[in-house]
Amino acid sequence: MDVVFTRTGSRRYGVSIGVPGESPRWQDPSPGFDEHIPHDLVHYVLEAELGLSAGVFGRAARGGGGFHPSEDLTARERARLKRKAKKREAGLNAKDHAGSADMALAESLAALCDALWRQRHGGLPDERPPWVTPPNVPDEYRPQVERVLSRLDEVAPLWNALGIGESLTFTWPSVVPHRAPAR
C-alpha cells in the first residue's frame, strides 16, 4: 500500500491511500496541519516504526479507516465502497476490543510523540499554566518513543521542504519516504 502525504495548500494537506487492485482512497483536508509535521504523518511514522498493524494505516491497508473512495467513481460505486469500509472498520474495532489494542496505543502514543517532538523543536512553550502538565512518557514506552522521535527528526525536514502540490510517498510499513514530483 502506498500512502501519499501531499501539501495541498499553504495551510492544508491531504493523504491518499493506494492499495493494489483497489480504487485509491483519500482524505483532504486531513486533520492537524502543521508546517513542520502534520498529525497524520506523525501517526504514520509511529505506526510504521513500531509495527502497529491495527492502527490507522494498518487498518487502511486492510480496507478500513476513514479514507474516502476516489472521486472518479460513480456515486453508486462510492456508496458501495463506503458501506464495505464501514463494515470492515466495525470488524477491526471488534478485534481491537477483543485484545489487539493497536488503535488505542497508536492514538495515545501519536499524541504524546507529537507533543514531545514539538516541545523539543520549540513548538510548545516551556512555561505553561499550572493546570497544564508536561507530556509524560510511561517508562515501558521510553525506548519506542525515542525511536519515533528520531524518525520524526528525519521526516520533518522533508515535509517542511515540500511546496504546494508536492508529496512524500511511503510504502506501508516502510518509514523511509520517497518524494514525488509536483502534480
Image (spheres, helix red, strand yellow):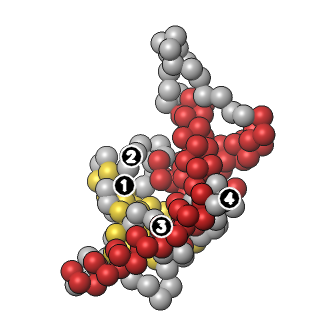
Q: Which dot, 3 or 2, sits closer to the camera? A: 3
- Mark 3, Cα crowd under 10 Å, few <14 / some 14-19 / many 20+, is some
- Marks 4 and 1 in Cβ contact (< 8 Å): no
What residue is disc 3 on? 90
Q: Residues under labels 4 and 3: Cα distance?
A: 15 Å
Q: Quadrant of the N terminus?
A: bottom right
Task: Residue 117 in the image: state x and y as whole percent.
Answer: 58, 37
Q: Residues under labels 4 and 1: Cα distance?
A: 29 Å
Q: Residues under labels 4 and 2: Cα distance?
A: 32 Å
- Marks 1 and 2 in Cβ contact (< 8 Å): yes
Q: Residues under labels 3 and 1: Cα distance?
A: 22 Å
Q: Name the residue type under label 2.
A: Phe
Q: Name the residue type under label 1.
A: Ser
Indicate which disc residue 60 carries.
Answer: none
What residue is disc 1 on? 30
Q: Nearer the viewer, residue 120 or 58?
A: 58
Q: Name the residue type under label 3.
A: Ala
Q: Is residue 129 visible?
A: yes
- Mark 1, Cα crowd under 10 Å, few <14 / some 14-19 / many 20+, is some
Q: Secondary structure at mark 2?
A: loop
Q: Which dot, 4 or 2, sits closer to the camera? A: 4
Q: Name the residue type under label 4.
A: Gly
* Number of numbered tags placed on the structure image: 4
Q: Nearer the viewer, residue 180 or 50?
A: 50
What residue is disc 4 on? 99
Residue at 54% over, 73% down: 61
Indicate which disc residue 33 carries.
Answer: 2
Which is more N-terminal, label 2 or label 4? 2
